[in-house]
Amino acid sequence: MGLLKRSHAPITPEAWRQIDAEAKRVLQINLAGRKLVDFDGPHGWQYAAVNTGRLTIGTDGGLGVPWGVRDVAPLIEVRVPFELPIMELDNASRGAVLDLAAVVSAAEKTAHAEDNAIFNGFRAGGIEGIIPTASYPAMTIPDDFADYPSIVVGAVETLRRAGINGPYALALGRPVMRVWPRPRRTAIRFASASSTSSMGRWCWHPRSTAPCCSRIAAATFS
């Protein structure tokens, strides 16, 4: 029996297949952070922390010799419960396509929680986040989306001057999503500016209120 105790659930294999497939589909659509950073895993339930390669030197604690504590980044577990009617689940064995709205909602919450931790940090879980740890001043986002290309180019140039080579990535937050549908000419301008700036990829980041430009694989998360 696995840690998830799936064998104890009164759910048929046909229903599990649909649940797993739908959860995977929604997660792949919504997980933005994994597109921009190095992702290492999965490593199984016994993998508890990531080695940072650093050591915190301690003061004399009674050992009588110099000592230090290895620094690690502990992993966190995210769990989002959901409920499905048994009768509906049984219909999978009869060939029905299940109503899995609850699975979709749970998968979306899980993806948004992970992205929020990656981009904005999660202090309680020991995750610093890309945006809070950025060492460069934030750039002012213009109200007119047509002016976004120049801001992207400026952000890339800031990284270049700091000696950070491309390819680069751009994560777009909620405000951009609201104004994105504009004439094709604007889209062409954006694509043109991005291509001249060695932009490797871009993605939607629904949990962010502002775009984030960084080098691809600028951080590693497990």
Image (spheres, helix red, strand yellow):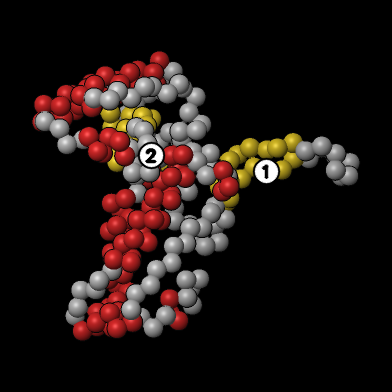
Residue 67, image x, y percentages: 78, 40
Residue 211 in view (yes/no): yes
- Dividing the picture into quadrants, the one containing residue 139 is top left
- Dividing the picture into quadrants, the one containing residue 66 is top right
Farthest residue to the left: give it.
184
Circle 2: residue type: Ser
Residue 193, image x, y percentages: 22, 22
Residue 212, image x, y percentages: 37, 32
Badge 2 crowding class, 10 Å Cα cut-off, few under 14, some 14 to 19, many 20 or more, is some
Relative side of 13 to 53, left or right: left
Disc 1 from disc 2: Cα separation: 33 Å
Circle 1: residue type: Arg
Q: Dot 2: what SS?
A: loop
- Dividing the picture into quadrants, the one containing residue 46 is bottom right
Q: Which residue is mark 2?
A: 208
Residue 133, image x, y percentages: 51, 31
Q: What numbered label is drawn on residue 70?
A: 1
